[in-house]
Amino acid sequence: MRITCVGGGPAGLYFAVLAKLADPGHEITVLERNPAGVTWGWGVVFWDDLLDDLFRYDPVSAERIWESARKWDEYEVRATGKPDTHLAGYGFSLGRHRLLEILAERAEELGVRISYSDELSDLAALPPADLVVACDGARSRIRDEHAGHFGAEVEVARNKYIWLGTPHVFDTFTFGFEKTSAGWIWYHAYPFDDTTSTFIVECQPSTWAALGFDTLDAHAGAEKLRQIFGKHLGGQKLIDHRAEVGGTGWLNFRRVTAQRWDHGNVVLMGDAAHTTHFAIGSGTKLAMQDAMALADAVASGDPLPVALERYEHRRKAALAPLQKAARASSAWFERLPEYADLPAKRFSYALSNRRGEYPAWRYLLHMSTQSPIPRTLLRRTLAVRRWTRARRRPPILANTA
Ligand SMILES: Cc1cc2nc3c(=O)[nH]c(=O)nc-3n(C[C@H](O)[C@H](O)[C@H](O)COP(=O)(O)OP(=O)(O)OC[C@H]3O[C@@H](n4cnc5c(N)ncnc54)[C@H](O)[C@@H]3O)c2cc1C
Protein backbone atom coordinates (compact mmCIF):
# COMPACT_ATOMS: atom_id res chain seq x y z
CA MET A 1 0.00 0.00 0.00
CA ARG A 2 1.23 3.56 -0.72
CA ILE A 3 0.59 5.68 2.35
CA THR A 4 1.21 9.42 2.75
CA CYS A 5 1.09 10.99 6.21
CA VAL A 6 0.71 14.76 6.08
CA GLY A 7 2.34 15.98 9.30
CA GLY A 8 5.34 14.61 11.17
CA GLY A 9 4.07 15.09 14.74
CA PRO A 10 3.66 12.22 17.23
CA ALA A 11 0.57 10.87 15.41
CA GLY A 12 2.04 10.80 11.90
CA LEU A 13 5.45 9.43 12.85
CA TYR A 14 4.10 6.77 15.19
CA PHE A 15 1.52 5.59 12.66
CA ALA A 16 4.28 5.34 10.04
CA VAL A 17 6.33 3.18 12.43
CA LEU A 18 3.42 0.85 13.25
CA ALA A 19 2.16 0.52 9.68
CA LYS A 20 5.66 -0.34 8.48
CA LEU A 21 6.11 -2.87 11.29
CA ALA A 22 2.82 -4.50 10.32
CA ASP A 23 3.78 -4.69 6.65
CA PRO A 24 7.33 -3.80 5.54
CA GLY A 25 6.01 -3.78 1.98
CA HIS A 26 4.06 -0.55 2.52
CA GLU A 27 5.62 2.50 0.86
CA ILE A 28 5.21 5.22 3.48
CA THR A 29 6.08 8.90 3.16
CA VAL A 30 5.69 11.48 5.93
CA LEU A 31 5.53 15.11 4.81
CA GLU A 32 6.60 17.59 7.47
CA ARG A 33 6.60 21.32 6.86
CA ASN A 34 9.36 22.02 9.44
CA PRO A 35 13.02 21.23 8.85
CA ALA A 36 14.37 18.13 10.67
CA GLY A 37 14.80 18.73 14.40
CA VAL A 38 12.61 21.85 14.50
CA THR A 39 9.42 21.83 16.53
CA TRP A 40 7.30 23.97 18.82
CA GLY A 41 6.38 23.30 22.43
CA TRP A 42 8.29 21.94 25.41
CA GLY A 43 7.76 18.75 27.39
CA VAL A 44 4.65 16.57 27.52
CA VAL A 45 3.45 14.37 30.38
CA PHE A 46 2.14 10.83 30.20
CA TRP A 47 1.32 7.95 32.49
CA ASP A 48 1.54 4.15 32.79
CA ASP A 49 -1.39 3.53 30.48
CA LEU A 50 0.43 5.00 27.47
CA LEU A 51 3.68 3.25 28.39
CA ASP A 52 1.87 -0.11 28.52
CA ASP A 53 0.46 0.52 25.04
CA LEU A 54 3.80 1.69 23.64
CA PHE A 55 5.56 -1.45 24.87
CA ARG A 56 2.83 -3.62 23.40
CA TYR A 57 2.96 -2.00 19.96
CA ASP A 58 6.70 -1.31 19.49
CA PRO A 59 9.05 -2.22 22.37
CA VAL A 60 12.03 -0.66 20.55
CA SER A 61 10.71 2.93 20.46
CA ALA A 62 8.98 2.38 23.84
CA GLU A 63 12.29 1.56 25.47
CA ARG A 64 13.93 4.67 24.01
CA ILE A 65 11.02 6.81 25.23
CA TRP A 66 11.21 5.23 28.68
CA GLU A 67 14.97 5.78 28.93
CA SER A 68 14.65 9.45 27.94
CA ALA A 69 11.64 10.20 30.15
CA ARG A 70 11.89 12.06 33.42
CA LYS A 71 10.09 10.29 36.27
CA TRP A 72 8.27 12.22 39.02
CA ASP A 73 6.36 10.87 41.98
CA GLU A 74 3.85 13.39 43.33
CA TYR A 75 2.21 16.74 42.59
CA GLU A 76 3.00 19.85 44.58
CA VAL A 77 0.48 22.67 44.99
CA ARG A 78 1.60 26.19 45.89
CA ALA A 79 -0.78 29.14 46.30
CA THR A 80 -0.36 32.67 47.62
CA GLY A 81 -1.14 32.82 51.33
CA LYS A 82 -1.37 29.03 51.80
CA PRO A 83 1.15 26.43 52.95
CA ASP A 84 2.32 24.05 50.19
CA THR A 85 0.32 20.82 49.88
CA HIS A 86 0.80 17.63 47.88
CA LEU A 87 -1.30 15.35 45.72
CA ALA A 88 -0.73 11.64 45.31
CA GLY A 89 0.29 10.43 41.88
CA TYR A 90 3.24 9.77 39.62
CA GLY A 91 3.99 10.19 35.96
CA PHE A 92 6.58 10.76 33.28
CA SER A 93 7.57 13.64 31.05
CA LEU A 94 9.58 13.97 27.91
CA GLY A 95 10.61 16.86 25.66
CA ARG A 96 8.51 17.03 22.54
CA HIS A 97 11.72 17.54 20.60
CA ARG A 98 13.20 14.29 21.98
CA LEU A 99 9.96 12.35 21.40
CA LEU A 100 9.90 13.36 17.74
CA GLU A 101 13.59 12.57 17.38
CA ILE A 102 13.01 9.03 18.72
CA LEU A 103 9.99 8.43 16.49
CA ALA A 104 11.63 9.85 13.36
CA GLU A 105 14.76 7.77 13.92
CA ARG A 106 12.69 4.62 14.40
CA ALA A 107 10.58 5.35 11.31
CA GLU A 108 13.67 5.86 9.16
CA GLU A 109 15.29 2.67 10.50
CA LEU A 110 12.22 0.79 9.26
CA GLY A 111 12.37 2.39 5.80
CA VAL A 112 9.81 5.20 6.11
CA ARG A 113 10.69 8.27 3.99
CA ILE A 114 10.38 11.54 5.88
CA SER A 115 10.30 14.60 3.68
CA TYR A 116 11.15 17.65 5.81
CA SER A 117 10.56 21.30 4.89
CA ASP A 118 7.74 19.96 2.74
CA GLU A 119 4.50 21.80 3.38
CA LEU A 120 1.38 20.48 1.70
CA SER A 121 -0.59 23.39 0.34
CA ASP A 122 -3.00 21.52 -1.91
CA LEU A 123 -4.28 17.97 -1.48
CA ALA A 124 -4.57 17.63 -5.26
CA ALA A 125 -0.79 18.16 -5.54
CA LEU A 126 -0.03 14.95 -3.61
CA PRO A 127 1.43 12.04 -5.58
CA PRO A 128 -1.11 9.18 -5.88
CA ALA A 129 -1.57 7.20 -2.65
CA ASP A 130 -3.89 4.44 -1.45
CA LEU A 131 -4.25 6.13 1.93
CA VAL A 132 -3.65 9.77 2.94
CA VAL A 133 -3.46 10.32 6.68
CA ALA A 134 -4.22 13.91 7.68
CA CYS A 135 -2.19 14.28 10.87
CA ASP A 136 -1.41 17.95 10.35
CA GLY A 137 -2.41 19.15 13.80
CA ALA A 138 -5.19 21.18 15.39
CA ARG A 139 -5.27 23.69 12.53
CA SER A 140 -5.37 20.94 9.89
CA ARG A 141 -5.50 22.41 6.42
CA ILE A 142 -6.84 19.15 4.96
CA ARG A 143 -9.71 19.05 7.48
CA ASP A 144 -10.53 22.72 6.98
CA GLU A 145 -10.49 22.41 3.17
CA HIS A 146 -13.30 19.85 3.51
CA ALA A 147 -14.85 21.31 6.66
CA GLY A 148 -18.39 20.65 5.37
CA HIS A 149 -17.72 16.96 4.82
CA PHE A 150 -15.85 16.33 8.08
CA GLY A 151 -18.38 18.37 10.09
CA ALA A 152 -15.55 20.05 11.98
CA GLU A 153 -16.34 22.43 14.80
CA VAL A 154 -14.05 24.60 16.89
CA GLU A 155 -14.98 25.83 20.35
CA VAL A 156 -12.69 28.49 21.80
CA ALA A 157 -12.05 28.25 25.57
CA ARG A 158 -12.25 31.39 27.70
CA ASN A 159 -8.93 31.39 29.57
CA LYS A 160 -5.66 32.62 28.11
CA TYR A 161 -2.62 30.33 28.24
CA ILE A 162 0.97 30.35 27.11
CA TRP A 163 3.36 27.37 26.78
CA LEU A 164 6.81 28.40 28.06
CA GLY A 165 10.01 26.70 29.13
CA THR A 166 12.50 27.45 31.89
CA PRO A 167 16.00 26.26 32.83
CA HIS A 168 14.70 25.90 36.40
CA VAL A 169 14.28 22.17 36.99
CA PHE A 170 11.22 21.59 39.18
CA ASP A 171 11.50 18.64 41.58
CA THR A 172 8.14 17.28 40.53
CA PHE A 173 4.92 18.24 38.76
CA THR A 174 3.96 21.55 40.35
CA PHE A 175 0.88 23.77 40.21
CA GLY A 176 1.52 27.35 41.41
CA PHE A 177 -1.17 30.00 41.92
CA GLU A 178 -0.24 33.65 42.44
CA LYS A 179 -2.70 36.30 43.53
CA THR A 180 -1.96 39.63 41.78
CA SER A 181 -3.74 42.99 41.99
CA ALA A 182 -5.46 41.98 38.72
CA GLY A 183 -6.61 38.54 39.91
CA TRP A 184 -5.23 34.98 40.02
CA ILE A 185 -2.67 33.69 37.55
CA TRP A 186 -1.21 30.18 37.73
CA TYR A 187 1.16 27.70 36.15
CA HIS A 188 1.38 23.96 35.50
CA ALA A 189 5.10 23.05 35.53
CA TYR A 190 7.08 19.83 35.26
CA PRO A 191 10.69 18.86 34.57
CA PHE A 192 11.23 16.96 31.32
CA ASP A 193 15.00 16.52 31.20
CA ASP A 194 18.02 17.37 33.37
CA THR A 195 18.07 21.05 32.39
CA THR A 196 14.56 22.16 31.47
CA SER A 197 10.97 22.33 32.69
CA THR A 198 7.73 23.04 30.90
CA PHE A 199 5.95 26.07 32.36
CA ILE A 200 2.37 26.62 31.14
CA VAL A 201 0.77 29.84 32.45
CA GLU A 202 -2.98 30.36 32.49
CA CYS A 203 -5.35 33.10 33.67
CA GLN A 204 -8.75 34.59 33.04
CA PRO A 205 -8.92 37.05 30.12
CA SER A 206 -9.72 39.99 32.44
CA THR A 207 -6.55 39.28 34.46
CA TRP A 208 -4.52 38.89 31.27
CA ALA A 209 -5.65 42.28 29.94
CA ALA A 210 -5.32 44.05 33.30
CA LEU A 211 -1.72 42.81 33.61
CA GLY A 212 -1.01 44.31 30.17
CA PHE A 213 -0.26 41.06 28.31
CA ASP A 214 -2.44 42.26 25.44
CA THR A 215 0.16 44.93 24.60
CA LEU A 216 3.47 43.32 25.63
CA ASP A 217 5.68 41.57 23.07
CA ALA A 218 7.08 38.09 23.76
CA HIS A 219 10.27 39.35 25.49
CA ALA A 220 8.47 41.83 27.74
CA GLY A 221 5.66 39.35 28.47
CA ALA A 222 8.08 36.60 29.53
CA GLU A 223 9.95 39.08 31.72
CA LYS A 224 6.70 40.20 33.37
CA LEU A 225 5.79 36.56 34.09
CA ARG A 226 9.26 35.98 35.50
CA GLN A 227 8.64 38.81 37.95
CA ILE A 228 5.21 37.46 38.94
CA PHE A 229 6.50 33.89 39.47
CA GLY A 230 10.04 34.84 40.54
CA LYS A 231 10.02 32.95 43.84
CA HIS A 232 9.12 29.70 42.05
CA LEU A 233 11.87 29.93 39.42
CA GLY A 234 15.06 29.87 41.48
CA GLY A 235 16.30 33.02 39.75
CA GLN A 236 15.91 31.50 36.27
CA LYS A 237 14.22 33.01 33.23
CA LEU A 238 11.13 32.01 31.29
CA ILE A 239 11.52 31.37 27.58
CA ASP A 240 8.87 32.10 24.96
CA HIS A 241 9.85 30.57 21.59
CA ARG A 242 7.72 33.19 19.91
CA ALA A 243 10.28 35.83 20.89
CA GLU A 244 12.48 34.50 18.05
CA VAL A 245 9.81 34.95 15.38
CA GLY A 246 7.78 37.91 16.65
CA GLY A 247 4.30 38.06 18.17
CA THR A 248 3.48 36.36 21.45
CA GLY A 249 2.58 32.82 22.39
CA TRP A 250 -0.59 33.67 24.36
CA LEU A 251 -3.53 31.64 23.01
CA ASN A 252 -7.02 30.47 23.84
CA PHE A 253 -7.37 26.69 23.76
CA ARG A 254 -9.31 25.52 20.66
CA ARG A 255 -11.43 22.43 21.19
CA VAL A 256 -11.73 20.73 17.80
CA THR A 257 -14.26 18.01 17.02
CA ALA A 258 -15.15 16.36 13.72
CA GLN A 259 -18.33 14.42 13.02
CA ARG A 260 -16.69 12.26 10.35
CA TRP A 261 -13.03 11.30 10.19
CA ASP A 262 -12.72 9.88 6.70
CA HIS A 263 -13.36 11.14 3.20
CA GLY A 264 -12.56 8.66 0.42
CA ASN A 265 -8.96 7.60 1.03
CA VAL A 266 -8.25 10.52 3.39
CA VAL A 267 -8.49 10.00 7.16
CA LEU A 268 -8.03 12.37 10.10
CA MET A 269 -5.81 11.42 13.03
CA GLY A 270 -4.56 13.07 16.25
CA ASP A 271 -5.18 16.76 16.83
CA ALA A 272 -6.55 17.10 13.29
CA ALA A 273 -9.51 14.94 14.36
CA HIS A 274 -9.91 16.10 17.98
CA THR A 275 -8.10 18.22 20.53
CA THR A 276 -8.13 17.68 24.28
CA HIS A 277 -7.48 20.47 26.77
CA PHE A 278 -3.95 20.53 28.22
CA ALA A 279 -5.40 20.57 31.76
CA ILE A 280 -5.41 16.76 31.58
CA GLY A 281 -2.18 16.52 29.55
CA SER A 282 -3.35 13.79 27.18
CA GLY A 283 -3.21 15.14 23.61
CA THR A 284 -0.01 13.32 22.65
CA LYS A 285 -1.20 10.11 24.28
CA LEU A 286 -4.47 10.24 22.37
CA ALA A 287 -2.71 11.07 19.10
CA MET A 288 -0.41 8.04 19.53
CA GLN A 289 -3.32 5.80 20.52
CA ASP A 290 -5.13 6.94 17.34
CA ALA A 291 -2.04 5.80 15.45
CA MET A 292 -2.25 2.36 17.12
CA ALA A 293 -5.95 2.00 16.24
CA LEU A 294 -5.46 3.14 12.63
CA ALA A 295 -2.50 0.78 12.18
CA ASP A 296 -4.60 -2.11 13.53
CA ALA A 297 -7.49 -1.24 11.22
CA VAL A 298 -5.26 -0.99 8.13
CA ALA A 299 -3.56 -4.28 9.04
CA SER A 300 -6.91 -6.06 9.40
CA GLY A 301 -7.10 -6.66 5.66
CA ASP A 302 -10.64 -5.27 5.47
CA PRO A 303 -11.53 -3.03 2.53
CA LEU A 304 -10.31 0.51 3.28
CA PRO A 305 -13.76 2.08 3.93
CA VAL A 306 -14.57 -0.65 6.48
CA ALA A 307 -11.16 -0.33 8.14
CA LEU A 308 -11.46 3.46 8.42
CA GLU A 309 -14.97 3.17 9.82
CA ARG A 310 -13.75 0.69 12.44
CA TYR A 311 -10.85 2.97 13.40
CA GLU A 312 -13.15 5.98 13.84
CA HIS A 313 -15.65 4.00 15.89
CA ARG A 314 -12.99 2.55 18.21
CA ARG A 315 -11.32 5.88 18.83
CA LYS A 316 -14.50 7.90 19.33
CA ALA A 317 -15.63 5.43 21.98
CA ALA A 318 -12.25 5.59 23.75
CA LEU A 319 -12.06 9.37 23.59
CA ALA A 320 -15.49 10.16 25.00
CA PRO A 321 -14.69 9.77 28.75
CA LEU A 322 -11.40 11.64 28.44
CA GLN A 323 -12.99 14.50 26.59
CA LYS A 324 -15.64 14.74 29.29
CA ALA A 325 -12.88 14.82 31.90
CA ALA A 326 -10.96 17.46 29.94
CA ARG A 327 -14.03 19.68 29.74
CA ALA A 328 -14.65 19.39 33.49
CA SER A 329 -11.00 20.07 34.16
CA SER A 330 -10.74 23.17 31.97
CA ALA A 331 -14.06 24.47 33.36
CA TRP A 332 -12.62 24.16 36.88
CA PHE A 333 -9.71 26.40 35.92
CA GLU A 334 -12.12 28.88 34.33
CA ARG A 335 -13.93 29.09 37.70
CA LEU A 336 -10.74 29.16 39.74
CA PRO A 337 -11.54 32.33 41.78
CA GLU A 338 -14.53 30.46 43.30
CA TYR A 339 -12.13 27.97 44.89
CA ALA A 340 -9.14 30.18 45.61
CA ASP A 341 -10.23 31.20 49.11
CA LEU A 342 -10.55 27.61 50.36
CA PRO A 343 -8.02 26.54 53.01
CA ALA A 344 -4.87 24.97 51.53
CA LYS A 345 -5.75 21.26 51.86
CA ARG A 346 -9.31 21.71 50.64
CA PHE A 347 -8.08 23.84 47.77
CA SER A 348 -5.60 21.25 46.56
CA TYR A 349 -8.21 18.51 46.96
CA ALA A 350 -10.64 20.54 44.81
CA LEU A 351 -7.85 20.88 42.23
CA SER A 352 -7.17 17.13 42.19
CA ASN A 353 -10.88 16.31 42.00
CA ARG A 354 -11.58 18.92 39.33
CA ARG A 355 -13.17 16.26 37.11
CA GLY A 356 -15.59 15.56 39.98
CA GLU A 357 -15.08 11.78 39.83
CA TYR A 358 -13.43 10.89 43.15
CA PRO A 359 -15.12 8.69 45.77
CA ALA A 360 -15.26 10.07 49.36
CA TRP A 361 -12.25 8.00 50.57
CA ARG A 362 -9.97 10.03 48.30
CA TYR A 363 -10.81 13.12 50.35
CA LEU A 364 -9.95 11.35 53.60
CA LEU A 365 -6.72 10.01 52.09
CA HIS A 366 -5.74 13.47 50.85
CA MET A 367 -6.40 15.16 54.18
CA SER A 368 -4.54 12.49 56.14
CA THR A 369 -1.41 12.37 53.96
CA GLN A 370 -0.29 15.99 54.10
CA SER A 371 2.13 15.54 57.00
CA PRO A 372 5.60 14.04 56.27
CA ILE A 373 5.27 10.45 57.55
CA PRO A 374 1.94 9.47 55.93
CA ARG A 375 2.98 11.35 52.78
CA THR A 376 6.22 9.36 52.55
CA LEU A 377 4.31 6.11 53.13
CA LEU A 378 1.91 6.97 50.34
CA ARG A 379 4.75 7.81 47.95
CA ARG A 380 6.43 4.50 48.74
CA THR A 381 3.18 2.61 48.17
CA LEU A 382 2.80 4.27 44.79
CA ALA A 383 6.45 3.54 43.97
CA VAL A 384 5.69 -0.15 44.57
CA ARG A 385 2.70 0.11 42.28
CA ARG A 386 4.84 1.72 39.57
CA TRP A 387 7.50 -0.95 39.99
CA THR A 388 4.93 -3.78 39.86
CA ARG A 389 3.38 -2.40 36.71
CA ALA A 390 6.80 -1.93 35.13
CA ARG A 391 7.68 -5.57 35.96
CA ARG A 392 4.95 -6.66 33.56
CA ARG A 393 6.79 -4.93 30.74
CA PRO A 394 10.04 -6.15 29.13
CA PRO A 395 12.99 -6.70 31.54
CA ILE A 396 14.75 -3.39 30.92
CA LEU A 397 11.77 -1.62 32.49
CA ALA A 398 11.67 -3.86 35.50
CA ASN A 399 15.33 -3.14 36.17
CA THR A 400 15.05 0.63 35.96
CA ALA A 401 11.60 1.37 37.43
C1 LIG B 1 0.15 24.08 26.14
C2 LIG B 1 0.02 22.65 25.71
C3 LIG B 1 0.49 21.65 26.54
C4 LIG B 1 0.37 20.32 26.18
N1 LIG B 1 0.81 19.38 27.03
C5 LIG B 1 0.63 18.09 26.74
C6 LIG B 1 1.03 17.06 27.64
O1 LIG B 1 1.57 17.33 28.71
N2 LIG B 1 0.79 15.75 27.32
C7 LIG B 1 0.21 15.43 26.14
O2 LIG B 1 -0.01 14.23 25.92
N3 LIG B 1 -0.16 16.36 25.24
C8 LIG B 1 0.02 17.68 25.51
N4 LIG B 1 -0.38 18.64 24.62
C9 LIG B 1 -1.06 18.24 23.38
C10 LIG B 1 -0.13 17.76 22.30
O3 LIG B 1 0.89 18.69 22.05
C11 LIG B 1 -0.91 17.46 21.01
O4 LIG B 1 -2.13 16.85 21.31
C12 LIG B 1 -0.10 16.54 20.09
O5 LIG B 1 1.06 17.20 19.67
C13 LIG B 1 -0.92 16.09 18.88
O6 LIG B 1 -0.10 15.37 17.99
P1 LIG B 1 -0.38 15.41 16.41
O7 LIG B 1 0.69 14.62 15.80
O8 LIG B 1 -1.79 15.07 16.17
O9 LIG B 1 -0.26 16.95 15.99
P2 LIG B 1 0.98 17.93 16.07
O10 LIG B 1 1.87 17.57 17.19
O11 LIG B 1 0.42 19.31 16.03
O12 LIG B 1 1.79 17.66 14.73
C14 LIG B 1 1.32 18.08 13.47
C15 LIG B 1 2.51 18.21 12.54
O13 LIG B 1 2.05 18.50 11.24
C16 LIG B 1 2.88 19.48 10.64
N5 LIG B 1 2.08 20.14 9.62
C17 LIG B 1 1.00 20.94 9.80
N6 LIG B 1 0.49 21.33 8.63
C18 LIG B 1 1.26 20.77 7.68
C19 LIG B 1 1.23 20.81 6.23
N7 LIG B 1 0.29 21.49 5.56
N8 LIG B 1 2.18 20.12 5.55
C20 LIG B 1 3.15 19.40 6.22
N9 LIG B 1 3.23 19.35 7.57
C21 LIG B 1 2.28 20.01 8.29
C22 LIG B 1 3.29 20.36 11.81
O14 LIG B 1 4.47 21.09 11.55
C23 LIG B 1 3.45 19.34 12.93
O15 LIG B 1 4.78 18.85 12.99
C24 LIG B 1 -0.25 19.97 24.94
C25 LIG B 1 -0.68 20.98 24.07
C26 LIG B 1 -0.57 22.30 24.46
C27 LIG B 1 -1.07 23.38 23.53
Image (tube, grey):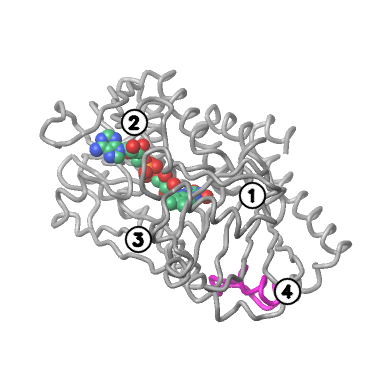
Quick check: 232 above or below 327? above
Q: Which mark is residue 255?
A: 3
Which amino acid type is shown beneath numbered disc 2?
A: Asn
Q: Is residue 354 shown in magenta?
A: yes
Q: Quick check: is 246 in the magenta stretch?
A: no
Query: Label 4's element?
Result: helix
On the image, numbered disc 1 is attached to which residue? Answer: 91
Amino acid at dot 4: Lys
Separation of residues labelled 3 and 2 (CA atoms)? 24 Å
Name the residue tied to disc 2. Answer: 34
Give the residue drawn at x 73%, y 34%. Answer: 400
Which is more toward the observer, 157 or 185? 185
Please provide percent x and percent y for residue 350: 62, 74
Q: CA distance from mark 2 to mark 1?
A: 30 Å
Identify the image quadrant of residue 20.
top left
Binning the other alpha carbons within 10 Å of mark 2 as few (below 14), some (14 to 19) or many (20 upward) gives some
The earlier-in-sequence mark between 1 and 3 is: 1
Across and down, in percent, residue 255 comes to 35, 61
Label 1 crowd bin: few (<14), some (14–19), many (20+), radius 10 Å:
some
Q: Position of residue 363 (x, y in %)?
A: 71, 75
Query: Which residue is the site of mark 4?
Result: 345
Taking the spot 71% from the left edge, 48% from the top edge, the residue there is 234
Q: Earlier in the sequence, mark 2 or mark 1?
A: 2
Asked if the beta carbon under badge 2 is closer than 8 A to the nearest atom of ligand 1, the reply is: yes
Compute the Cα span from label 1 to label 3.
Answer: 25 Å
Q: Quadrant of the N terminus?
A: top left
Q: CA distance from mark 4 to mark 1?
A: 22 Å
